[in-house]
Image: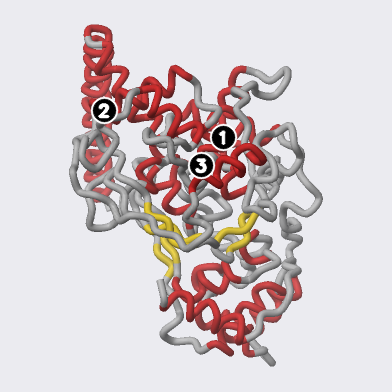
């Protein structure tokens, strides 16, 4: 025991010494970088553009498995067909190497290519329209000077008639986009204004979290409209509202965006890529600005699941483990070791099930998808460990998954409807075709 105490103390002293050394090295590196940037403003501008490209999540859409970064080729499945992202390296043959800064700005903010043809709004230019001139300049400088050119051409988007008539997008743009520059909430602090700018422009959060109209248009583009960030639907998943987020503190929001997890939840679905490629790379100041802005938005009456109430009857029955339904038995056998009999999981490790948005969503597709395929948190700078949840598609049939999902959606304080085997079969089939 004495040896263990001595060893631990020595290790602690060593760790502190190393930490101090690393901190000193880091401080010297930061000082050196600041001096270098002052001496080379072009390098600083490229670095700023790289940061803004992360904030805009350009990497996620314009990169695909097996291809070099920013060479495009990602297949984006939409209601009108499959759209392939383009090569945005400075290649003069396959990318944007021939674009002037004005043409680059028009493509990013107006969805108009250098040849005058229109982009499809899979490119979130309705949000990017609010990007400032200074940030467009930094982005252009980065893509032209900080990204390696690649002549690897992306697959060509080829939609069926009439969606292949790109000129029709001019009418869509006239009806559903705005060329008004960013203004920000009236009377907001500088921190909230910064958060609003990031959310409404580069972050294009409304692309997923704002409901869409009959023409697949976002029903609102900024916080002046109560529909902005009021929740939506993506690939069958209910996308939660971001307005106010009353059950999460500002730090909860920062933790989630920075690490893909917090004391209550962990990422799944499309948000995993957003955290990995974009938000985990943002500064603490910008993440806090985003969180501060979201907390200022009024909460709609149906935007969040009811807060957990303890749900003692579910806990008692699972603890007694007698006269269980099929769903309850499956939960104990497959889920309770991590998420516990109280549905509360473990902070920053296993997310809550009681009160979770994905559990209480009107459409159970997201929950069923997670049960079948599993999920895992991304590895980020401040949370490098990957926490995986296994998928159960191989061991549970459609009836069993339906029973498990039905129990989870009605257990504890959850209040969502039952799931049937047909719904599970549909999700399973879609997974097999991806």
Q: Is residue 283 left or right of residue 41?
A: right
Q: Residues within 10 Å of mark 1 (few under 14, many from 20)?
A: many
Q: Could you say which is closer to the camera, residue 299 or residue 75?
A: 75
Instruction: Kindly identify which residue carries mark 1.
Output: 199
Point out residue 106 in the picture as x, y percentages from the top left corner: 45, 29
CA–CA distance in space, label 2 to label 1? 25 Å
CA–CA distance in space, label 2 to label 3? 21 Å
The structure residue drawn at horizontal position 66% and vertical position 34%, both measured from the top left corner, is 222
Q: Is residue 340 above or below residue 146?
A: below
The mark lying in front, picked from 1 and 3, is 3
Instruction: Kindly identify which residue carries mark 2.
Output: 144
Q: Residues within 10 Å of mark 3 (few under 14, many from 20)?
A: many
The structure residue drawn at horizontal position 30% and vertical position 56%, both measured from the top left corner, is 155
CA–CA distance in space, label 1 to label 3? 12 Å
| Between discs 2 and 3, the one toward the N terminus | 3
Instruction: Kindly identify which residue carries mark 3.
Output: 124
Q: Is residue 256 above or below residue 105?
A: below
Q: Is residue 201 left or right of residue 113?
A: right
């Amino acid at each position: 025991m004495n040896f263990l105490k001595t060893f631990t103390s020595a290790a602690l002293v060593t760790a502190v010494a190393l930490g101090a050394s690393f901190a000193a090295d880091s401080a010297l590196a930061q000082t050196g970088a600041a001096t270098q940037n002052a001496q080379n403003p072009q390098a600083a501008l490229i670095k700023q553009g790289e940061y803004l490209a992360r904030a805009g999540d350009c990497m996620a859409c314009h990169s695909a498995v097996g291809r070099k970064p920013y060479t495009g080729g990602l297949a984006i499945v939409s209601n009108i067909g499959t759209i392939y992202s383009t090569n945005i390296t400075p290649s003069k043959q396959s990318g944007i190497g021939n674009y002037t800064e004005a043409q680059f700005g028009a493509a990013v903010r107006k969805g108009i290519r250098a040849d005058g043809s229109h982009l499809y709004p899979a490119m979130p230019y309705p949000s990017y329209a609010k990007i400032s001139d200074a940030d467009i300049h930094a982005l252009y400088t980065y893509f032209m000077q900080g990204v390696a050119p690649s002549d690897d051409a992306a697959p060509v988007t080829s939609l069926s008639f009439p969606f292949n008539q790109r000129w029709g997008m001019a009418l869509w743009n006239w009806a559903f986009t705005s060329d008004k520059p960013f203004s920000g909430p009236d009377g907001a602090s500088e921190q909230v204004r910064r958060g609003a700018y990031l959310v409404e422009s580069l972050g294009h959060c409304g692309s997923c979290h704002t409901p869409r109209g009959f023409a697949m248009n976002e029903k609102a583009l900024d916080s002046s409209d109560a529909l902005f960030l009021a929740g939506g639907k993506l690939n069958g998943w209910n996308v939660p509202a971001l307005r106010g987020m009353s059950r999460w503190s500002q730090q909860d929001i920062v933790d989630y965006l920075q690490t893909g997890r917090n004391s209550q939840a962990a990422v799944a679905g499309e948000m995993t890529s957003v955290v990995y490629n974009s938000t985990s790379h943002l500064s603490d100041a910008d993440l806090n600005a985003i969180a501060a802005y979201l907390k200022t938005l009024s909460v709609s009456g149906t935007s969040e699941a009811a807060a957990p109430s303890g749900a003692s009857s579910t806990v008692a029955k699972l603890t007694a483990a007698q006269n269980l339904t099929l769903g309850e038995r499956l939960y104990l056998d497959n889920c309770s070791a991590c998420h516990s009999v109280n549905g509360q999981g473990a902070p920053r490790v296993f997310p809550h099930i009681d009160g979770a948005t994905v559990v209480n969503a009107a459409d159970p597709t997201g929950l069923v998808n997670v049960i079948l395929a599993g999920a895992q948190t991304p590895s980020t700078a401040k949370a490098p460990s990957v926490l995986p949840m296994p998928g159960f598609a191989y061991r549970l049939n459609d009836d069993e998954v339906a029973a498990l999902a039905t129990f989870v959606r009605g257990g504890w304080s959850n209040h969502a409807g039952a799931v049937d085997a047909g719904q599970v079969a549909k999700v399973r089939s879609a997974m097999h075709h991806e």
